[in-house]
Amino acid sequence: MSAESFERLLKPLLITGAVLLVLDLFIDTYPYVPRHGVPWVYAFLGFSGFLAVMWCAQYLAPWLRKPEDYYASDDDEPAGTADVSAHPDEKTSSSETDHRGAL
Amino acid sequence: MSVIAPQFIYLLAALALPLLPVRWRHGVVLATPILALLLVISHAPGVHYTINAVGFELSFVRMDELARVFAIIFSVAAALAALYAWHVRDLMHQIAATVYSGAALGGVLAADLVSLFVWWEMTALASVFLIWAQRSTHALAAGLRYLIVQVTSGVLLLAGLLLHFYDTGSTSFEHLGLVSTGTALMFIGFGIKCAFPLVHNWLQEAYSTATVTGTVLMSALTTKLAIYALARGFAGTELLITIGAIMAVFPVLLAMLDNDLRRVLAYGMNSQLGFMVVGVGIGTDLSLNGTVAHAVCSILYTGLLFMCVGAVVHRTGTAKASELGGLWRSMPITAACCVVGGASIGAFPLLSGFVSKSMTVSAAAYEGHYLVWLLLLVASIGAIAHTAIRVPFAIFAGEDSGVHASEAPVHMRYAMLAAAGLCVLIGLLPAGLYALLPYEADYSPFSLAHLLTQLQMIVFAAIAYVLLQRRGRMLADTPHTLLDTDVAYRRWAPRALAHVVGTIAALNAAVVQFGSAAVQQVYQGAARISSPDAPLAQAWRVGTMMLVVIIAMLLVLVVNLF
């Protein structure tokens, strides 16, 4: 998707978010946690949680992402590059009609 | 009670398959779980089909509320997987899938530990052929690693049940608890099959390597059988709360990082299993119902997601995020089903995850496990990020990758639409699912608070995603291998072993070299003093010889005196 598409998505999302934040002021969102009266906690969790996950993922990426052939010597094939469609009955087909057994 | 236990229907079908004409086989593979489902639904409650064998009393069917709901969803999943795999003509694949489905059902219905062990091992042995059916070197190696892990789980179960039998004289599969070495061994065995943290990596490797149709079936059965076993044997074991909370959170980051979308789904499933394990650990009626309900929903939406990604693999030959994008135009039905599956795992209101996941989360809060409750919320946000948003965007939206594909075959579409329909149906009318749950617990998912909080989390996570995308700060999908705990046994252990072997070989070579040199020197010394020219070989004078004899005798005399 292009940057313009995300730009278009942002406005309705922000409006929906604002409506939800207003509703939060009138509805008790803590039926079981003893923290009545603190609004917008779930909105904060959703927003900051997503950012935190992305930040941690970006931080860890250089350590955990290795070249595709990292385990190649184990299996004599680059990990994750096994031909997933190599099964005799699961060949990739370009059209449905040439696929055996298609309904 | 029917004439035959439901799981034996599968075994009979597997025996019959080689004898049938090729065009009938896929029909039999599909009809078998449907027949088994009918038998399960109509089966009378209680323990049935009991025999005495090898000194143990074996009971093949225990039909109670807990077993029945798992038996039903296992049969439904097997039927959907069979429909999805309608095109498969490989006899080995069909037999393996049928035996595997029957073994998983047998495990759920087993009333004693011995027959549970038999079915447990049969699931391992049958399912590995769904990996090997890929017929590549990598699949062979991955299958062997999978088999070692699964058989280890079974061996621990066997050792545990024998110790338990020695302690108690019973092999009945009831609540066990962590009370002895035997039950602890069984707990570890169940944990391995459930993909507990640090012993989880078999799941990601196997599910991303198996055939696309095999993965759909595997995602439904193996780990859920372990969840059932934990719920039956270890409900209320507090250790499970900690394990489950860790299990729910740690795969989130790995799922965000992995490039292989089938591995991403496997990590997502691993996280969802954490919710179920927490529910078992809390052990209240609500939490156990939450575990069972979430197992049912997870089987459906995880299976649906594996079907969608599998259909993409089927058409394009790849599941790598870095090679996909913009496929919604060519695969609109698959895209729609993938969105439903993603939204379900993200617990969007009116979808299945919404009515099941919150039961466990609520139970954690009700019982005062606030940290666990918070971790489960973080895991929920993670599910929104790595599966609900990332997977559909990576495949169907995003930049057009230039990969062209046609829509999934019709039978795959039917299977995906059926699974998606069930996700929506459960989300809209959860009463049907709740009626199947084993315990009495009053729970209503459609409270204003639940709707509002869940929507807030989803919408604000989506806002964060869009903001990051707009600023180009999202993690790029690049080709890579992701390190996980498998690095220990695929990289470190072989290298350490090679180092040890190399050191031993070097030591051996040094010892041999030193020994050879020493022997050589002794030989040369002996040769020096015994050669024809050496002093010892020369003729000595009589006087000299007499002097030597006298000195020797004096030495003997002195030694004897003292």
Image (cartoon, grey):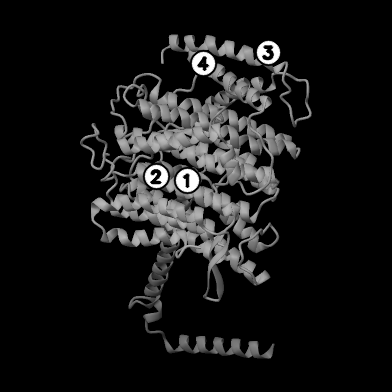
Q: Residue at x 62, y 40 (%)?
A: B246
Q: Residues within 10 Å of mark 1 (few under 14, many from 20)?
A: many
- Rounded to the nearest angstrom, the CA distance separating label 1 from label 2 is 9 Å
Question: Chain for mark 1?
Answer: B
Task: Give the mark, 1 or 2, whose residue is nearer the N terminus.
Answer: 2
Residue B32 drawn at (x, y percent): 38, 54
Which residue position is annotated with label 2?
A: B81
Q: Which label belongs to residue B220?
A: 1
Residue B7 drawn at (x, y percent): 45, 59
Q: Which label belongs to residue B466?
A: 4
Of the residues shown, which amino acid type is indicated by label 3? Val
Question: Chain for mark 4?
Answer: B
Which residue position is annotated with label 3?
A: A22
Disc 2 vs disc 4: which is toward the camera? 2
Instruction: Tell me the element at label 2.
Output: helix
Of the residues shown, which amino acid type is indicated by label 2? Ala
- Rounded to the nearest angstrom, the CA distance separating label 3 from label 2 is 45 Å
Q: Are marks 3 and 1 on the same chain?
A: no
Q: Quadrant of the C terminus of chain B?
A: bottom right
**Whether label 3 touches label 2, CB < 8 Å:** no
